Amino acid sequence: MSVSLLLLILAGLAVVGFFIGRARALASASGDIRKLHSLPQYYGAHVAIFTFVPAAVFLALWLVVVPLVNNFQVQQNFDVADLPEGRDISLVMTEVSQVASGLSQAQAAGALTQDEARHPERILDDLRDRFKTIGIALGGDIRPSVLTAAVELRDARATQRLVVTVLVIALALAGLVFAARQINPDHRARTSVEVSIRVLL
C-alpha cells in the first residue's frame, strides 16, 4: 500500500474517531453539555489526535529508518570485488535501488510477467530494453551482482509494505480505542488537545 493511501486511511479513521469521541462525550453526560468539562468537539478532537498522530509518527520513522536498514543489509552481501573501478558502494546502491524500483514498475506496467520480475536473471540480456519500453533509462548494462541485490531489495520492500500497513492501522485503531475509553464528563479534553497541539508545534 502506498504512503499516500495509508495516510488517507489514517485521516479517515481520525474523522471516525472525532465523531465517536463527540458522541461518547454527549452520551456520558446524557446529552447535557453543561455536565461536560469541555465542549463536545474537544472530546472528538482528543480521539482524532490519538488516532492519527501516533500512527503517523510511527510511519514517518519507519520511512526514515527502514531504507537505511535495507541498504545496510544489501551492502553486507555485496562483494567489494563486484564494485566497478572508481565507484564507491553508495553509487552502486543508487543503481540497485533504481533497478529494484524498475522491476516493480515494469511488472505493474505489464512489461514483465510476475515470474520474470521475481527471476529477472533469466532475461538479463533483454531487461534493459524492457525498462526502456516504459520510460526507465539506466546509465549502463545491468550487472548480475546489481540485479541480485535489486531483487533482494525489492522483495524486502514488498514484505515491509505489508508489515507497515498492518502496524500503522493497528496503532491507529489502538489509539482510537484508548482515547475513546478515557472519555467521561470530567475528562479535561480541551487541555489534552491544547497540550497535543503545542507538542506538535
Image (cartoon, grey):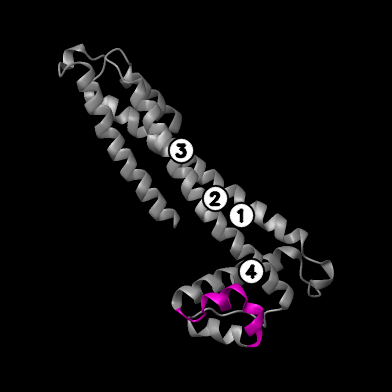
Mark 1 residue type: Pro
Q: CA distance from mark 1 to mark 3?
A: 21 Å
Give the magenta range.
Answer: 110-125
Q: Which residue is label 3 attached to? A: 171
Q: Within 10 Å of the Cα at label 4, are there few (<14), some (14-19), or many (20+) other Cα atoms? A: many
Residue at numbered disc 2: 63
Residue 120 covered by magenta stretch: yes
Q: Is residue 199 left or right of residue 14?
A: right
Q: Measure the alpha-carbon separation of dots 1 and 4.
A: 15 Å
Q: CA distance from mark 4 to mark 3?
A: 30 Å
Mark 2 secondary-structure assignment: helix
Judged from this view, the residue extending furthest toward the right is 81
Q: Residue furthest front?
A: 115
The amino acid sitting under disc 2 is Leu
The answer to whether residue 142 is left or right of residue 130 is right
Amino acid at the residue labelled 3: Leu
Give the residue at x 38% y 54%.
5
